[in-house]
Image (cartoon, rainbow, N blue to C red):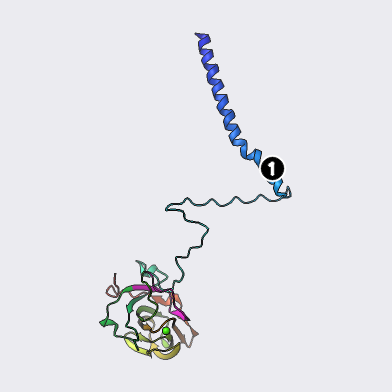
Amino acid sequence: MKIFIQGILFFFFGFVVAIACNDAEFDNNPTVNAPSFEDASNEPKDAPAKPEPKKQPESVGGNVDANLPDTTIVDDTFVECAPNLEASVYPIKALLYELPVDTPALPNFASLPAIKTVCMKQLDIATRDFEDGFPGVDNLIEWFGLDIRFKVDIPADGNYTFFVNSDDGSKLYIDGNLVIDNDGQHSPRELSASVNLTKGIHSFKVEYFQGPKTQIALELFWQSESFPKAYIDPSYLKPDLDPNFTIN
Ligand SMILES: [Ca+2]
């Protein structure tokens, strides 16, 4: 019996040693190969270690090449509106309308069906070609209109001058009053007007339309006795949260 047990132990021990050797050989393989690789590169021995190549993320839905740049967002002038506009960096909401070819001036937006709600960071579109269109809307780069709403937190009582540069037409309303009429089909044109405003929140509306492609422009500047002409800093821009001013 004793011999039998010794035999079993001997056999088992031999088996464990065989596996351990196998593992050791596997673990040592990279170390064994490494010197010959380094020697072949002729790098000085004291060269800093090469950084490990970045591990590629596992492909989830097909053969996506992780090295390709993300080209899905090419222009963030107009984006899908965030659920919480107050926390969004795109707080300016606009209803988008398709217009008939050869529209000569701003339409009455209330009489038209809007096709989309889009959001913007700022009215800072300097004159440029517009070829990227709107998120989720195909090939709308001319003959469209935007009814744009937002609030401005006026920092102090005073006289403010506003400037609107647009291609094509635009109108600026503050608290329901027409302040600048820059309407009509035209290349970039800047008009200005001054108004007295009290400190606090005021409602702004900018109506805009793009006539023939491809050039667009839509810039809103302000200026007061205490600061020079500039875009309205985003910290003064607030969303218009009117629940009726949206489409889904
Ligand atoms: Ca145009």
Instruction: State which image quarter holds ligand 1.
Output: bottom left
Label 1 sits on a secondary structure element that is helix
Q: Residue at x 62, y 37 (%)?
A: 29
**Residue 128 colored in magenta in the image:** yes
| Residue occupying the point 37% across, 83% down | 209
The outermost residue toward the left is 111
Q: Position of residue 206 (x, y in %)?
A: 37, 83
70 versus 165 height, above or below: above
Q: Residue at x 66, y 42 (%)?
A: 34
- Residue 27 in percent (x, y) is at 59, 36
Residue 81 percent location from the top left of the image = 36, 69
- Bounds of the magenta span? 117-135
Q: Is residue 59 above or below residue 23?
A: below
| In front of the other: 161 or 134 | 134
Taking 16 as reference, is 139 above or below it?
Answer: below
Residue type at mark 1? Ser
User: Is 164 situated left or right of 5 in this image?
Assistant: left
- Would you call the spot at circle 1 few (<14 residues within 10 Å), some (14-19), or many (20 or more)? few
Q: Quadrant of the C terminus?
A: bottom left
Q: Please tell me in which quadrant of the rendered image residue 194 appears.
A: bottom left
- Quickly name the residue at label 1: 36
